[in-house]
Amino acid sequence: MARKSKQKEAILRLVKGMTSHPTADCVYEEVRREIPNISLGTVYRNLRLLQQEGKILELDLAGTISRFDGNVQDHYHFRCEQCGRIFDVDRPVDREIDSLVSRKMGFKVSYHRLEFRGLCKDCQS
Ligand SMILES: [Zn+2]
Ligand SMILES: [Zn+2]
């Protein structure tokens, strides 16, 4: 396999295997264990490519640096206000809201984003 696609495959595999919604820097730290001479720029470029190809998601969470998600199914997130960790919320996305808002406002809704905030289990104790 060519070096370039090998790097990309490694990055994809890592992001898919991480449930922590890593930043590019976190992905870089992980992938370096496997490919020590990889550059941060290469990691950024490949994350961008993978996102454009729909293989990973870039989370548009308010006011934070980009985080990436290997779970490309539409899903909600919970962000802990104390430790900053982001969790997937195990609840189906509510499509009703889209049509409700469409009907009420006369807009054509593509999707909605919802982020829950509070304290995770660890931070509650
Ligand atoms: Zn927490
Ligand atoms: Zn997620």
Image (cartoon, rainbow, N blue to C red):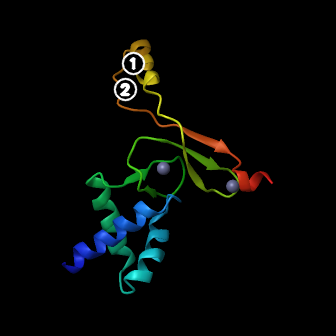
> Vertical placement of 30 versus 65: above or below?
below
| Between 11 and 112, the one nearer to me in the picture | 11
Badge 2 marks a residue whose secondary structure is: loop
Q: Is residue 116 left or right of residue 26?
A: right
The quarter in which the C terminus is drawn is bottom right
Dot 1 amino acid type: Ser
Residue at image location 39% in from the left, 44% down from the top: 73
- Please report whichever mark, 2 or 1, sits nearer to the chain's N-terminal start: 1
Image quadrant of ligand 1? bottom right
Q: Residue furthest right?
A: 125
| Disc assigned to residue 109 | 2
Dot 2 amino acid type: Val
Q: Position of residue 106 (x, y in %)?
A: 37, 15
| Between 108 and 72, the one nearer to me in the picture | 72
Badge 1 marks a residue whose secondary structure is: helix
Q: Position of residue 17 (x, y in %)?
A: 44, 63
The quarter in which the N terminus is drawn is bottom left
| Disc assigned to residue 66 | none
Q: Position of residue 42 (x, y in %)?
A: 32, 74
| Between 48 and 86, the one nearer to me in the picture | 86
Residue at image location 42% in from the left, 81% down from the top: 32
Disc 1 target residue? 102
> Vertical placement of 19 versus 39: above or below?
above
How far apart marks 2 and 1 lie (CA) works out to 6 Å
Marks 2 & 1, CB-CB < 8 Å contact: yes
Count the numbered circles shown: 2
Residue 55: quadrant of the picture = bottom left
Q: Position of residue 30 (x, y in %)?
A: 46, 75
Residue 70: quadrant of the picture = bottom left
